[in-house]
Image (cartoon, rainbow, N blue to C red):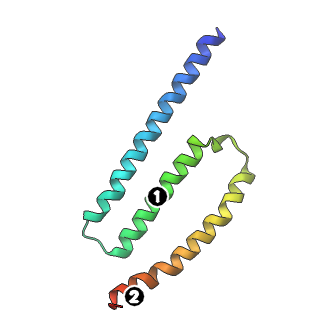
Amino acid sequence: MSEAVAGEHTRDESSLYVMIWGWLIFLLIAGLAIFVLPISKALAAFLIFSIAAVKAALVIRNYMHLKHEHLLIYLIVLIPLLFFFGLMMTLIPDIVYRHAMGM
């Protein structure tokens, strides 16, 4: 009986991985589709970074099996993410205004 439960558990994990893979493909296509939308470069950059963050979270949580970890590992990851977000918010306006002014 335990073999049947183990087989069912493996099948559930496989379907989860396929579903996550499908979401990653969808988000990849959505990120590429942003280039053809008539939106500003700043908004396009924000959307692309947002989609990349969602894809990274999906990979980290499911493929690296961090969904079974305690809260401390998430707090350790939060500090570099906040640092990255701060750098991004600092540098993106500079890049956008530099290109807008023709420098």
Looking at the picture, does residue 78 appear above or below residue 102?
A: above
Residue 60, percent across and down?
A: 58, 48
In space, the residues marked 1 and 2 are separated at their CA atoms by 24 Å
Determine the residue positioned at 50% across, 33% down.
16
Q: Give the image quarter of residue 79.
A: bottom right
- The quadrant of the rendering that contains the C terminus is bottom left
Q: Secondary structure at mark 2?
A: helix
Looking at the picture, does residue 11 appear above or below residue 26?
A: above
Residue 89, percent across and down?
A: 52, 77
Q: Secondary structure at mark 1?
A: helix
- The quadrant of the rendering that contains the N terminus is top right
Q: Give the image quarter of residue 61.
A: top right
Looking at the picture, does residue 56 appear above or below residue 97?
A: above
Q: Is residue 56 left or right of residue 1?
A: left
Residue 45, percent across and down?
A: 40, 70
Determine the residue positioned at 58% across, 75% down.
86
Q: How many marks?
A: 2
Determine the residue positioned at 68% across, 40% down.
68
In this figure, which residue is indicated by the disc labeled 1? Answer: 52
Which mark identifies residue 44? none
Determine the residue positioned at 71% across, 58% down.
75
Q: Residue furthest top?
A: 1
Nearest to N terminus: mark 1 or mark 2: 1
Q: Amino acid at mark 2?
A: Arg
Q: Amino acid at mark 1?
A: Ala
Q: Give the image quarter of residue 81.
A: bottom right
Which mark identifies residue 98? 2
Dot 2 alpha-carbon crowd within 10 angstroms: few under 14, some 14 to 19, many 20 or more: few
